[in-house]
Structures are given as structure tokens and as C-alpha cells.
Amino acid sequence: MNQVLLTLGALTLGGSAAVLLLAWVGRSTRGRYGARWRCWGWLLLCLRLAVPVPLIPQVQTRAPIQVDIPDPPAAVLPISPTTPPGSGGEENALPSSSPEQPPKQSDASLPLEEPASGNAYPAFRPTPAQIVFALWLLGAAAVLVWNIAAHLRFLRYLRRWSAPVEDDEAIAAFNRLGDQLCLDKRPRLLVCQGLKVPMLAGAFRPAILLPQEAVTGGELAFSLLHELTHYRRGDIWRKLLALWVNALHWFNPLMWLMVRLLERDTELACDEEALRRLPPEDYSAYGQTILNAVARLQNREPKGEHNE
């Protein structure tokens, strides 16, 4: 228990320094280095923080062997030969070598035994290390239960309100982009009520969810390209790993900041990879599609669209 707490403390201190360093690097070198390199840095950091145990086991030195040397036997006095009876030698005979028995004590002088109490076990008093360990486990369990419950609610919502896409244009664009990205396995393509923008969801059964309102033309192609790039990069697993690290280090505010920075750099890295697959004349339209999606998520009117 103490070893786990010491390792956890060392990891969270080192991780805090790494988070600040990566945040500074992302702010000062954003134009010169791509976000994908920062994503690799976040991934390596999360992999180390995800295991709160020492990677190199400590080598325990063996205690020196102690040899017990027995004490030498006590010296025995020589016994003179016995004299014949009647010669008066009994008076001069040596006393017997048998040990003398101590005098018996009277029952009155013996100490009285205290009566045994009703509770035979001592009262449990937790140590400070046990209290800290219990609080850490309680906080980590609370964060995990909260995220799992939110995920289960979302899955229940999908089972109720999602359905396979039947639009031929969306299916054709989905298959064309999947071939362009060389995807052997592809997520499901579903339409879901209540969504504002397309999104990728699900780790074990991934699916691209389209809003119920029809998304057509270039906006549909760019949205599908963005989500399929997320799927190809495995960004869902990166976010799950970051959530696990955040649950283990819930007491550190910088770990909550790390999750936000990782999500930001993941989106930027996805956009960088998607733009490399588009001709330069489509860069502006792709960027406008992403800005419109952000505006819808923030309940703002997308730029270039007006409500009648």
C-alpha cells in the first residue's frame, strides 16, 4: 500500500511537469510542428501514468546469516570418593550436585489475574496511509462510475433513436472515402435523432452517427472524411486511455487539463491528416465545415447559414 502511494505521488509529480511542458510546446511551436507529434507525446505520457506501480521491481538485499553459537557447558566440580559407612565421613561429604528447588510461594503472594474483557480483539485504528489509500480509491471509483454511467446512457439512447442510413448519397460517399483511406474494417453508418453534427462513437462497436437533418454535398463528404480519419487513427482509444489516467489521478487538476489538451490536439491532428488527402482548393470549404459544426455545438448560428 505504501509503495503504491509513493509511486502514485512520484508519477503525478512527474506527470504534472510533463503536462506543463507539452502545453508550453504546443503553445510556442504550434506553427512549426504538427499536432500529431504532440499526440504521440500525450500517448506516451498516458501510458506511463496509467500503471501506478514501479516498472522496475526493487531488488531486496538478503539479510546476513546469523549463526547461534551455544554457550560452553558449566564447570563441574570433582566429587571426592565416598568413605565407608560408619567412619564419620558423612559429615564431610560434599553436598549433592542436584539443583536446589526454589521455595514455593504461598497462594496469598501470587498476583491476581485480571478477568478477560468481553472484546477479545483490539480496536481497529487505521493508519494515515490507509486513510489516504481509501480516499484515493473512493475518488477513482467515483470518476470511473460517472464515466461508465454516462456511456451506458448514451448507448441506451442510440439503441432507441438510431437507425441505419438509407440515403444513397451518404452511403456512396461513405464507401468511396473508406476505399480512399484503405479501411478494411469500417464503422457502421447510422442516423440518430437529436444530434447536431456527425460524430464517431463506440470503442468495441464503432459507428458514425449522422444527424437526422439531411447533410448533403461537400459538407457531407468533409464530415465523413473527418470522422473516418478519427476511426483510422484510433482516437477513441486514446480518449479512453486519457479518461482512465484522469480517474487514477483525479486529485491532480493538471490531469483534467491534460484531457482537454489531448482532445484539442487530437482534433487538430485529425484535421491535418484529412487536409493532406484533399486538394488545396478544398481547404477553405473543409475548414468552413468544421467551423459550422463547432458553431452548432455551441448553439450558435453557423457562419454562412441563416434561419428563415
Image (cartoon, rainbow, N blue to C red):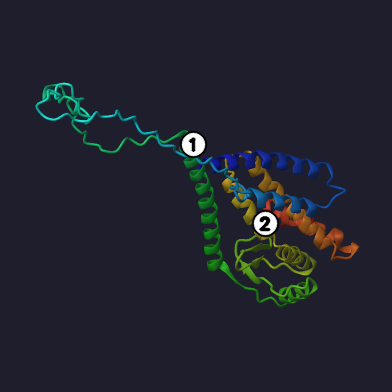
Q: SS at mark 2? A: helix
Q: Looking at the image, which is closer to me, 13 or 227?
A: 13
Q: CA distance from mark 2 to mark 1?
A: 32 Å
Q: Position of residue 150 (x, y in %)?
A: 54, 55
Give the foreground label among 2 and 1: 1
Residue beneath the point at 69% across and 59% down: 235
Q: Position of residue 270 (x, y in %)?
A: 77, 59
Q: Looking at the image, which is closer to me, 225 or 18?
A: 18
Judge left or right: residue 113 versus residue 245. Answer: left
Residue farthest to the left, as pictured: 86
Question: Would you call the spot at circle 1 few (<14 residues within 10 Å), some (14-19), or many (20 or more)?
Answer: few
Question: Would you call the spot at circle 2 few (<14 residues within 10 Å), some (14-19), or many (20 or more)?
Answer: some
The quarter of the picture where residue 249 lies is top right
According to the image, label 2 marks what residue?
Answer: 238
Q: Looking at the image, which is closer to me, 133 or 67?
A: 67
Residue beneath the point at 66% across and 50% down: 48
The quarter of the picture where residue 58 lies is top right
* Amino acid found under the numbered disc labelled 1: Ala
In this view, 16 is above or below 278: above
Q: Looking at the image, which is closer to me, 288 or 139?
A: 139
In this view, 283 is above or below 133: below
Q: SS at mark 1? A: helix
According to the image, label 1 marks what residue?
Answer: 129
Judge left or right: residue 95 versus residue 229. Answer: left
Q: Can the viewer see residue 268 in this picture?
A: yes
Mark sitting on residue 1:
none
* Amino acid found under the numbered disc labelled 2: Arg
Q: Position of residue 265 (x, y in %)?
A: 75, 51
Q: Can the viewer see residue 302 in this picture?
A: no
In this view, 267 is above or below 217: above
Q: Along the polypeptide, which appears first: circle 2 or circle 1?
A: 1
Judge left or right: residue 109 versus residue 213. Answer: left
